[in-house]
Amino acid sequence: MIDPTQFALYVAAALLLAITPGPGIFYVAARTLAGGRAEGVASSFGTGLGGMVHVLAGSLGISAIVLASAELFTALKLVGAAYLVWLGIRTIQAARRDMPAGLAGGTAAPPIGARRAFREGVLVEALNPKTAAFFLAFVPQFVDPTAGQIALQFVVLGFVSVALNTLADIVVAFAAGGIREGAAARPALISRLRQASGGAMIALGLGLAFARRPPA
């Protein structure tokens, strides 16, 4: 059983980390500006599920194996980086392709839709080894070895962190969605926002590509 005082400290720390701007928040904001609030919220739940993949892998010791291997860490981060860059390029291309329709008075449809945004959010987070490193560095500090069921404690604490992160991402999605809706009457601005969002995804991908493996 997790000590209530220790758990309260954990929730406070996890909440502080959740509201601190990071790659996850920037990704959700970029997806929202590119495709609208529904895509942003769907991406938030997607990255949440992707985060739980790392939590479960951490509880089973899989994440530790990946982080201990330079080859596995590099392979995972490069796949994740390439995926983010590809999403960014596709977002920019879609924005440029839809711009004439918007300028003609039509309304361009969201580039991918909520279901695909959810799936992409899962992959973006699941392919990010930095998320695995975060959970392995943060969660064990609040696990009580004397209470037993270490893996279960890890999963419970990890779920709390993922839930808080997802809640923060949803708030960001609604805020970014308001910005996008405010620009709805200016299709050229919408196109620029979408292209900028694609650029942000590419930047996140490049940042991940140059991430270093945490020291053992």
Image: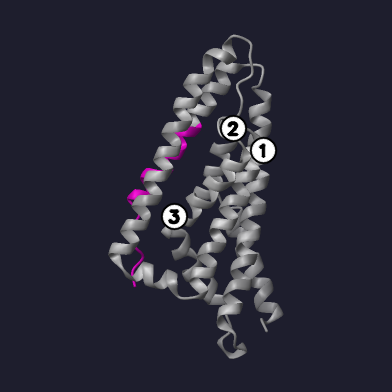
Q: Which residues are magenta?
A: 197-216
Dot label at residue 35: 2
The earlier-in-sequence mark between 1 and 3 is 1
Q: For this rendering, which residue is in front, 107 or 163?
A: 107
The mark that comes first in sequence, 2 or 3, is 2
Within 10 angstroms of label 3, few (less than 14), some, or many (20 or more) residues?
Answer: many
At label 1, the amino acid type is Ala
| C-alpha distance separating marks 2 and 3 | 22 Å
Report if the CB atoms under discs 2 and 1 are less than 8 Å apart. yes
Q: Position of residue 8 (x, y in %)?
A: 69, 72
Q: Which residue is mark 3?
A: 127
Give the mark count.
3
Above or below 26: residue 177: above
Give the numbered dot on residue 38. Answer: 1
Q: Position of residue 48 (x, y in %)?
A: 59, 55
In the structure shown, which secondary structural element does the residue marked by tag 3 occupy? loop
Look at the image and say whether residue 70 sits in the magenta stretch: no
Q: How far apart are the alpha carbons under marks 1 and 3? A: 23 Å
Outermost residue on the top side: it is 104
- Callout 2 amino acid: Gly
